Image (cartoon, grey):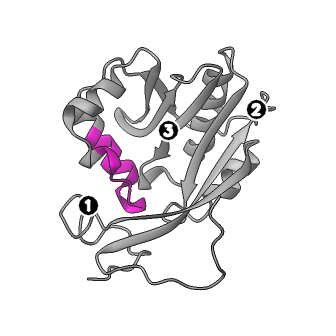
Amino acid sequence: MVVLPNGEFDVPAGKIANVVTHLEMTKRPVIPSDPAGAWTLRRVEAPELDWYRDLFRRVGEEWLWFSRVRMPDAELTAILHSPLVENYALAHEGRDEGMLELDFRDAGQCEIVFFGVTAKLIGSGAGRWLMNRALELAWSRPIARLWLHTCTHDHPGAVAFYQRSGFRAFRLQIEIEDDPRLDGTARRDAAGHVAIIE
């Protein structure tokens, strides 16, 4: 393990940095009551890349989700079409407005790889409803661990939401990446809460 000194460190121009929080649960939690809402969930078998990336952007661009936009098509297709990776869409008023990706490729555990709803549904209860479905789906399998990660670019209430859902934090990391707004991967005006340093 590398021991880092305390202090502040410069991040090069053109890069973004954030703190990644990893959270887990090792037993099925008590699932909260569902909020009232007209949402449905459907599994999307072997998602088409255009559909997937459109929903990925609509859910995550404001939080600087960009990994799956930059990922080569063949690599993304291999993940999404794996029989051990499940993709779901939350639909509202006839349109896909939320996404859930569950990865069972590591035996005995499940990772919630991507989870979120579009801006129009934030605060509506749709996120709680979707998390309840995620917990039910993941723990319907013989797993011993469910985990996910979030970061400081995400919604400011994300860590508290996951903790209320039964997760506990177990690891912090610092992540430094090329700013996706500078190469066109994300809109230039996305994630106004994260400064662009050129």
**Residue 47 visible in the displayed image:** yes
In the displayed structure image, the side of residue 30 where residue 123 appears, left or right = left
Q: Are marks 1 and 3 in contact (CB under 8 Å)?
A: no
Q: Provide the residue designation for mark 3.
A: 113
Q: Are marks 3 and 2 in contact (CB under 8 Å)?
A: no
The span from disc 1 to disc 2 (Cα, nearest Å) is: 35 Å
- Looking at the rendering, in which quadrant would you find the C terminus? bottom left
Q: Residues within 10 Å of mark 1 (few under 14, many from 20)?
A: many
Kind of residue sitting beneath label 2: Ile
The mark nearer the N terminus, 3 or 2, is 2
The span from disc 3 to disc 2 (Cα, nearest Å) is: 20 Å
Q: Nearer the viewer, mark 1 or mark 2?
A: 1
Q: Which residues are magenta?
A: 53-68
Q: Position of residue 164 (x, y in %)?
A: 75, 49
Q: Provide the residue designation for mark 2.
A: 31
Q: Position of residue 134 (x, y in %)?
A: 60, 30
Q: Residue 64 lies in magenta, yes or no?
A: yes
